[in-house]
Image (tube, helix red, strand yellow):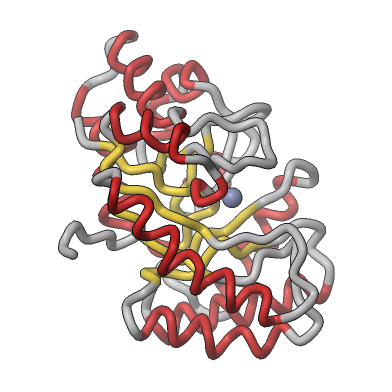
Amino acid sequence: MRKVDSHTHAYMLHARDLEPMALAGVEDVVLCSFVPIARYPETLIDHFTELDTIHRSRFDELGIKAHLFVGIHPRSIPAEWKRVLPIIEEFVSSGKAVGIGEIGLEKASDLELEVLREQLKLAKELDVPVIVHIPMSDRTSIVDKVLSLAKEVKFDFGKLVIDHTSNDTIDIINEANAVPGLSVKPPLLTPKDVAENIGKYSNGLLNSDCASLTDTDPLAVPKTVLYLKKVGVESGIIDRLAYRNAMKTLRLSRAP
Ligand SMILES: [Zn+2]
């Protein structure tokens, strides 16, 4: 069973935590840009370069292919955020990044909405997928706001991954034909939640959202695969959740 972890900040982790991912058969990881504090555009710009150079090769050494998503996260929007947009464009156009993320909404302030709108427009122009963050509170109203922004800019919902989906938001996302990102982490989803509602979640993209600052597990994807197998979920569905849906939606390629 092939596995891709479709949303991580695994660049924050030590090799001793990355090696078990490789041993558990994770072949591909998506590295989503994020720094907790970015007062200046240069902080993000340097971060993107760090992902492309230092961190990409750390994963290469473990036999894991890293795919980059770069963007302005709603929790750390620099004052002069517009200066980051041409850099995101350059990363995508040159093939260093395959999409825009992690972007999204945290409190849905006017500034956050404007930053998200501009990044959706850019992703549309570049014809690439986006990975969109939703917060822990006001979740359904935030998802509605993401969907209406995407509609406003005529963004292709097939390329709109709304991540950190859980039992509260999965129906709205499915009904809109957007793509649910499934972060298996507390307090959102457990492997059991996915198994018990497998019909609702089968279009999803499993991920760990692993990072050093949060209660996450770099092995969330292989552990979920193991659990789904144990409770008898059909292997074709597990293959889609753990591999095929992400490869297709995020247009990940195994070529060097
Ligand atoms: Zn994340």
Rendered view: 127 above or below 2:
below
The quadrant in which the C terminus is found is bottom left
Rendered view: 89 above or below 185:
below
Residue at the left extreme, as displayed: 255
Which x, y percent locates residue 127?
A: 37, 79
In the picture, measured across the screen, residue 247 lies left or right of residue 159, that is left
- Residue visible at 29% across and 18% down? 233
In the picture, measured across the screen, residue 42 lies left or right of residue 99, that is right
The quadrant in which the N terminus is found is top left
Work out whether residue 1 or residue 50 is closer to the camera in this orientation and state it.
Answer: 50
- Residue visible at 35% across and 50% down? 59
- Residue visible at 33% across and 17% down? 226
Tell me if I can see residue 177 in this picture. no
Which x, y percent locates residue 238?
A: 28, 29
- Residue visible at 50% across and 51% down? 11
In the picture, measured across the screen, residue 215 lies left or right of residue 178, that is right
In which image quadrant can residue 239 be found? top left
Rendered view: 47 above or below 134:
below
In which image quadrant can residue 255 be found? bottom left
Which x, y percent locates residue 91?
A: 43, 80
Rendered view: 55 above or below 233:
below
In the picture, measured across the screen, residue 88 lies left or right of residue 81, that is left
Tell me if I can see residue 63 in this picture. yes
Work out whether residue 174 or residue 243 is closer to the camera in this orientation and state it.
Answer: 243
